[in-house]
Image: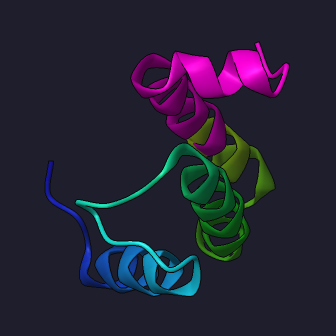
């Protein structure tokens, strides 16, 4: 899926802010990344659409790291 240059920059910045890379992102870092990306997206697409994107990112994380959700009672 193509990503706009602004969104690409936002992703790189938020990954950097949580101390991660695309290849090395723990579940805990992913939660922080998702929260920061949701805040950034809110500026560009509004709160409702940012929350939709957040739900999508949380679902992807839940599929990738179900044990994290079980340990933290997030399921």
Give whichever of 4, 63 is nearer the camera.
Answer: 63
Q: Is residue 61 magenta?
A: yes
Look at 72% across and 15% down and name the residue there. Answer: 70
Give whichever of 42, 13 is nearer the camera.
Answer: 13
Q: Quadrant location of residue 10?
A: bottom left
Residue 7 lies, in percent from the top left, at 38, 74
Which residues are drawn in magenta?
54-75
Residue 23 lies, in percent from the top left, at 23, 60
Give whichever of 46, 40 is nearer the camera.
Answer: 40
The type of colouring in the image is rainbow
Left or right: 39 as drawn, with respect to 7: right
- Above or below — where is 7 with respect to 74? below
Numbered disc total: 0
Look at 81% across and 28% down and name the residue there. Answer: 72
- Above or below — where is 9 with respect to 28? below
Q: Quadrant location of residue 64?
A: top left
Q: Quadrant location of residue 21?
A: bottom left
- Above or below — where is 20 with respect to 32? below
Name the main secondary structure of what is drawn in magenta. Answer: helix
Look at 35% across and 86% down and name the residue there. Answer: 9
Residue 29 lies, in percent from the top left, at 58, 59
Look at 42% across and 72% down and name the residue there. Answer: 20
Quadrant that contains the C terminus? top right
């Amino acid at each position: 899926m193509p990503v706009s240059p602004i969104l690409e920059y936002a992703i790189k910045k938020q990954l950097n802010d949580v101390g991660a890379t695309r290849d090395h992102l723990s579940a805990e870092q992913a939660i922080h990344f998702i929260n920061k990306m949701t805040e950034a997206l809110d500026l560009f697409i509004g709160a409702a659409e940012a929350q939709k994107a957040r739900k999508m990112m949380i679902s992807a994380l839940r599929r990738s790291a179900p044990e994290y959700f079980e340990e933290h009672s997030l399921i």
